[in-house]
Amino acid sequence: MTTTPAPAPHSPAPRRRGRVVAPVAGGAVWVLLLAALAQGCAWPAGGAVLSETAYREHLRHTREAGEDAVRRLGVDPDSVIKRQEMANASCVDDLGMDSEGVTRDRPTVTWTPGFASDAAYTAAVDALRKEWSAQDLTVEDVPAPAAGEPGAGLPGVRATDDRGVELSLRPDRYGGEPTLTADGGCVRHQGYLTEW
């Protein structure tokens, strides 16, 4: 007679720690991602919060950088200034990430030097391209607006200086008038300035 060995006693399956660790780790990853997103939303459009004094210095530099470019075209900047503004709809904190007393502004100054002809304008674009390249700035060509658009056929040029001010000479997008712009970028700062 053959005997069948008795089955081994049934032992409970070992606990799997992975089932507990995975949800906790996954939750931590989501928390970190949300924190990074919140931090990211506060930073790209403004960076560090400048003091009122530092922001006034940035305003001054923005205007002076543009004035220097206009002078290089042989024109007095005060005679052709078109607009000087701080507020810009694209520089508003829609997500509510800024603390109390912090404002976002985009200082921008525009000049309309006026050129006798399209050839004179093109020569000015070439002159600024050479000057900005000589200053070791990264220079980009701005394509001419297409036929039927304001400023059609007039290419432009732009560069960003060592303090983050974008300088450009190009046709104005609304009227096509050749315009030199100094754009100080979206900046977060203490206080609320109404003029500069």
Image (spheres, helix red, strand yellow):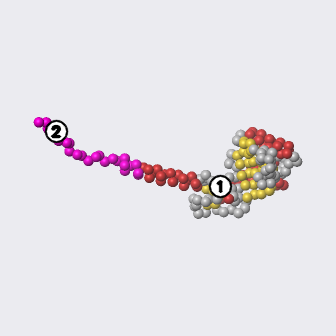
Q: Earlier in the sequence, mark 1 or mark 2?
A: 2
Instruction: Say which of 148 and 110 sits in front.
Output: 148
Q: Secondary structure at mark 1?
A: strand
Q: Position of residue 35 (x, y in %)?
A: 51, 54
Q: Position of residue 133 (x, y in %)?
A: 74, 40
Indicate whether residue 3 is drawn in magenta: yes
Give the numbered dot on residue 2.
Answer: none
Residue beneath disc 2: 4
Q: Position of residue 148 (x, y in %)?
A: 80, 50
Range drawn in magenta: 1-24
Local crowd size for mark 2, using a 10 Å CA cut-off: few (<14), some (14–19), many (≥20)? few
The residue located at (85%, 43%) in the rendering is 119
On screen, residue 16 versus residue 53, left or right, reads left
The residue located at (29%, 46%) in the rendering is 14
Quadrant holding the C terminus:
bottom right
Residue beneath disc 1: 187
| Of marks 1 and 2, the one in the foreground | 2
The residue located at (63%, 53%) in the rendering is 45
